[in-house]
Structure formats: C-alpha cells, structure tokens
C-alpha cells in the first residue's frame, strides 16, 4: 500500500473564500500532512490564519510554542491558550505584499486518529515578500498541542482578522500517511 | 500512480562545481529536494545558492532564521541573484564524512499564477562549534513554471559523496 494518499486537494477559485476546511477525515491513516500555498486578500502586508481541529474554537484546547523571525532579532513565544480558538498563528502574504506571491505552510499531525492522547502538530510557515522591512516578512516554526483525545476528523483554516478572504489560486493539499 | 515519486537522484562520484535538475515535468503539484551537502572549500560552513530556470538576475529574495550560538539570528535580503541558505552546508575543514542535511519544498512550482516560493531547512557542522540549524524561505519574482533547478556552493565544488534527490508530489 502506498505510504502517501491524497485526501483532498483544492485550488481556491476566483473571488476567494472566507475559509477552507476538510471534514469527515477517515481514521485509516497514521499521520496527516497538510501543505498550503496561500495568500490573503486582506489590505495589509500579511494576514494571520487560524488553524482549527475538529471545528473547535475553544481557546483552552490550543497551546502554541513558536520560534519566528520578522526582523534581525528572532523571538520565541509560548501561549498556553489561544486568544482565539486555533493555533497561533501562521501568516500569509496580504494584498500589499508583492503581487502573485504566496506563502507556504506545512503542518504534520502525527497519530491523529488515536483516542488515548492529546494531539501534537508541527507547523512550518513562511510569509514571503520582497521586503527587508520588519514585519513585512516572517518565517516561523510552531509546535502546537490540541488538548483533546478525540480523533481528528476535521481541519480548518480561516482569517484571524476576518478582514480578508483566502485569495484565489491558494492551494490546500491534505495527505494521509500510512505506516507499514 | 504513487503520490510521491522520485524524479531524479544525483550521487556525486566525483567533485562537481554545480548540480542541475533539468527538464522537470509540470505534472506534479509540489516539489521536494533532499540533499546531503559538503564543499571542497577549506571552511567550516558556507552558503548553498539556488537558481531557478537559469535566471541569474537580481530577482530573488531571502528570509531566514538561524541558530548557531545562544543568540539566534535572522536576516532578510532582496535583489539577490539567487536563493540561498544562511551557511547550511559543510566545508572541507570539517572531518571527512560529515555532510550537512538540506530539505527544500517548492509548492505549486508549475502554477503560472504564482511567483515561486521555496521553504528551506538545513543543518550543518555537528562536530564543530561553528554549527548551524536554520529555517528559511526564498522568493523568485517570476511566475514561470519551474523546469530547471541549479545548485552551486558559495565556494569550491560539491564534494564527492554529495547526494541530491528531487521528488514530485501529486495532488490527485
């Protein structure tokens, strides 16, 4: 059996969408891998995206530990809970960033279907732009904990600000990864 | 059809000034490059330079965060002539047999509605104090589909024993 299976692939159509989600994810894989090439329509250099699991917006269920850089001085941050439900916060280029430029997001969810343990995720994210100005670019690694023993059946991505749709041509590819 | 397919592997039986993957088909959704890197230049660590589709103009940007001491660093660069790592590969001042690890993702590489963005991870020099671990992103301000990727060490040549494998990831 192939180790990788495409569960879902979507390219956002003209006009953009408020959010992306995949639901009814089967429990038949060992791990999940999400790859996103994304951009926001928000009138700013970037938009923050909220990544939710199982549709939960319960702030106490999400914690995030972050290493990131948006200037010459990297920073690390730790959030025991989420200000808004979801992991804090991957970013995508906004409408003021270089045209046609999309950020990248890769998220691993190992052992996503187990019902004994909380779920951990690892997110690699880049808000790319042709700029050296602070806050107009960002790279980060996020380790997240979703404090729920429920199997993951849904993943969602939406704008934190609510001020910009996910832009057209953004793509979301969700893989199921199987062990031997 | 497998979701992940190895497009090509290059294992260097002899030192080489550059490594090129050409005629990359547009039939995949994403690309991933995994490499084991070392240079013949007599230093501990150096940059890896990446050019896309033969473009050597100043059309690239780079953003990176790097840990090597108790104080991590970061940099941003525009108008560059290549995508680059912040060091990230070994030189020949390190003991023989030590190669740096490198992974690069290029999402939607064949989508002509998008500039090309690469995410980079690299680690180097594990037995020396001049070590590195880093994560970064590179931008090529061009919407052409990627058909060629050129790798060049910042100095010297790639050492014998370097290995590069390019994978294609399908989305259907």
Image: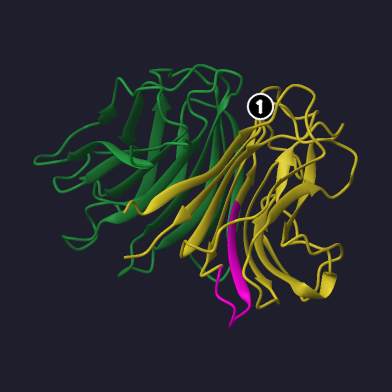
Chain colours: A yellow, B green
Could one spot residue A79 in this view of the protein? no
Res. A6 visible in picture:
yes
Q: Nearer the viewer, residue A13 or B82?
A: A13
Question: Where residue A100 sits in the image (x, y, percent)?
Answer: 67, 23
Which quadrant: the N terminus of chain A?
Answer: bottom left
| Image location of residue A44, percent across then percent down | 85, 35
* Residue located 54% across and 64% down the image: A27
Give the mark count: 1
Magenta range: A113-124
The image shows residue A143 at horizontal and vertical percentages of 62, 67
Residue B2 vs residue B97: left or right? right
**In this rendering, position of residue A113 left or right of residue A77:** left
Report the quarter where the C terminus of chain A lies. bottom left
Q: Is residue A96 magenta?
A: no
How far from the left and from the top, in percent, is residue B64? 56, 48
Q: Classify 10 Å Cα crowding around label 1: few (below 14), some (14-19), many (20 and above).
A: many
**Residue A61 left/right relative to B64:** right
Q: Chain of mark 1?
A: A
Residue holding disc 1: A169
Which one is nearer the viewer's eye here, B55 or A112?
A112
Please state which of residues B108 and A47 is positioned toward the viewer in this rendering: B108
B143 left or right of A46 in image: left
Q: Quadrant of residue B163?
A: top left
Q: Residue at x 33, y 24 (%)?
A: B24
Under circle 1, the secondary element is loop
**Above or below for A151 versus B47:** below
Q: Does residue A114 belong to the magenta stretch? A: yes
């Amino acid at each position: 059996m192939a180790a990788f299976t495409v569960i879902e692939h979507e390219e956002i159509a003209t006009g953009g969408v408020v959010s992306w989600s995949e639901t009814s994810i089967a429990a038949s894989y060992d791990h999940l891998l999400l790859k996103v090439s994304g951009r926001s329509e928000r009138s700013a250099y970037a938009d923050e995206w909220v990544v939710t699991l199982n549709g939960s917006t319960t702030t106490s269920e999400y914690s995030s530990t972050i290493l990131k850089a948006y200037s010459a001085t990297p920073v690390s941050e730790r959030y025991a809970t989420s200000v808004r439900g979801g992991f804090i916060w991957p970013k995508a280029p906004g409408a003021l960033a270089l045209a046609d430029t999309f950020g990248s997001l890769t998220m691993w969810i190992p052992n996503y279907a187990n019902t004994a343990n909380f779920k951990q995720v690892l997110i690699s994210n880049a808000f790319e732009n042709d700029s050296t100005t602070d806050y107009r670019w960002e790279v980060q690694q996020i380790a997240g904990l979703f404090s729920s023993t429920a199997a993951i059946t849904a993943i969602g991505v939406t704008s934190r600000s609510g001020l910009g749709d996910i832009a057209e041509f953004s793509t979301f590819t969700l893989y199921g990864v199987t062990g031997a | 059809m497998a979701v992940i397919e190895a497009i090509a592997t290059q294992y260097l039986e002899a030192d080489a000034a550059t490594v090129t993957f050409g005629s990359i088909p547009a039939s995949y959704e994403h690309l991933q490059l995994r490499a084991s890197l070392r240079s013949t230049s007599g230093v501990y660590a150096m940059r890896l330079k990446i050019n896309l589709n033969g473009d050597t103009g100043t059309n690239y940007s780079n953003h990176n965060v790097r840990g090597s001491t108790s104080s991590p660093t970061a940099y941003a660069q525009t108008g560059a002539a290549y995508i680059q790592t912040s060091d990230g590969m070994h030189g020949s001042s390190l003991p023989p047999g030590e190669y740096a690890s490198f992974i690069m993702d290029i999402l939607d590489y064949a989508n002509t509605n998008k500039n090309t963005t690469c995410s980079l991870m690299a680690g180097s020099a594990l037995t020396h104090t001049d070590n590195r671990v880093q994560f970064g992103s590179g931008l090529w301000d061009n919407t052409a589909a990627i058909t060629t990727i050129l790798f060049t060490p910042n100095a010297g040549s790639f050492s014998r024993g370097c290995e590069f494998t390019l994978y294609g990831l399908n989305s259907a």
